[in-house]
Amino acid sequence: MNDMNRYLEEAHMYTRYPDLYRRLYPKVNDSIERHIRVKGEDWEPTDREVEDMIDEIYEKMMSECPEIDQDLDERKHSMSSIDAMQRPYYGRRRLTRDLIGIILFGSLIGRRRRRRRYFDYPGYGYGPGYWY
């Protein structure tokens, strides 16, 4: 029963995340898992592979939510002052790609941390010198 309560709590916490995150996270995990199946558990992505994964996930999101790629009207309305024209423009496309990258890197780092914690250290899963 304890496992069921923990599962329900985790499921409830997941519903608190924004809708965009809940749409992106499974796509990011699927992409990582597919690469791990092909390249092995010790796979570390190159910069090019990370960019390709972001492109792939972004294309899937665009097919699901085509409004993500529509930035032209937003830029016209926000260009009312000289300052607005001079600073970098972060439209939906760029923000979505950045969010995909953040989720992707977080998942990759979390995967490395779990793998190292459970498989690299002998004994009870603690670091060197901490078991008695």
Image (cartoon, rainbow, N blue to C red):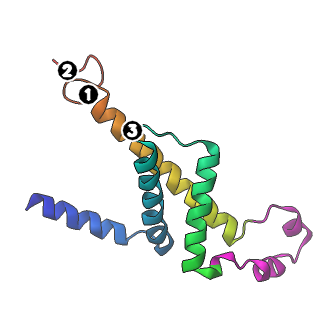
Per the model, the C-alpha gap separating discs 1 and 3 is 13 Å
Q: Is label 3 in a helix, a strand or a loop?
A: helix
Give the main secondary structure of the magenta stretch. Answer: helix
> Residue 126 has which mark?
1
- First in residue order: circle 3 vs circle 2: 3
Contact (CB < 8 A) between labels 1 and 2?
yes
Instruction: State which quarter of the image contains the N terminus.
Output: bottom left
Q: Position of residue 92 (x, y in %)?
A: 67, 72
Q: Is label 2 in a helix, a strand or a loop?
A: loop
Task: Name the amino acid type tagged 1.
Answer: Tyr
Seen at 57% across and 56% down, the residue is 53
Per the model, the C-alpha gap separating discs 1 and 2 is 7 Å
Front residue of this view, candidates 77 and 114 = 114
Residue 69 inside the magenta-drawn segment = yes
Badge 3 density bin: few <14, some 14–19, many ≥20, Cα 10 Å: few
Q: Position of residue 107 (x, y in %)?
A: 45, 51
Q: Quadrant of residue 85?
A: bottom right
Q: Quadrant of residue 77?
A: bottom right
Residue 108 inside the magenta-drawn segment = no
Task: Name the amino acid type tagged 3.
Answer: Arg
Task: Name the amino acid type tagged 2.
Answer: Trp
